[in-house]
Amino acid sequence: MSNDWPVDPDGEEGSEGMRKFDMRIIADKVDEEEDFPLDRNEFVDEYGDYPIRVNHETIVAMSDIFDYVDEDIDEFETILDMHKAVGDAMRAGNFWKYHPQGKDPEKVPA
C-alpha cells in the first residue's frame, strides 16, 4: 500500500476503518439530487487519486477502476447509471474476486 494516498484508505475519510468498500466509497462522493448528470472526466479529475479499498487485501486508485468504464460514456445521467457502469468496470478489471453472475460464475468461490 502506498503512503501517497490523499487520505488513509482505512481511516474515517477513506473506508471508515475498513467498514466501507468499493462502490460505497465511490457513491459517497456524489449527491444523487445535485450532481447528476455527472461528467465522468470531471469526476475522475477530482477524485481519481482517491484510494478505494476493493477487499480486505486490495486498495486501488479510483482512476484505476474508471479506466475500465466504457470509453463511450462521457456522462452519467443518474446515480443508477453510474453504479451500473462502475460495476461493469469492476468486473471487467477483475477487481472483484467473487462473481455470482456473469461470464464465469464459478471463477473464484466465495
Image: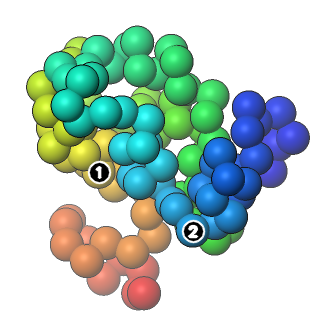
Please report the residue visible at 60 percent of the width from the left and 56 percent of the height from the top: 15
Say if 43 sits above or below 103 in the image: above
The residue type indicated by label 1 comes to Gly
Please report the residue visible at 29 percent of the width from the left and 51 percent of the height from the top: 87
Q: Is 95 in front, or is 52?
A: 52
Query: What colour scheme does the image use?
Result: rainbow
Residue named by callout 1: 87
Q: Which mark is residue 44?
A: none
Say if 96 sits above or below 26 in the image: below
Residue named by callout 2: 19
| 66 displayed left or right of 11 | left
Can you see residue 92? no
Q: Position of residue 48 (x, y in %)?
A: 55, 26
Please report the residue visible at 25 percent of the width from the left and 77 percent of the height from the top: 100
Say if 86 sits above or below 102 in the image: above
The residue type indicated by label 2 comes to Arg
| 51 displayed left or right of 71 | right
Q: Secondary structure at mark 1?
A: helix
Q: Is 55 in front, or is 17?
A: 17
Crowdedness near tag 2: few (<14), some (14–19) or many (≥20) residues, C-alpha within 10 Å: few
Proximity of marks 2 and 1: CB atoms separated by less than 8 Å: no
Q: Quadrant of residue 72?
A: top left
Q: What is the residue that sits farthest to the bottom in this orientation?
A: 109
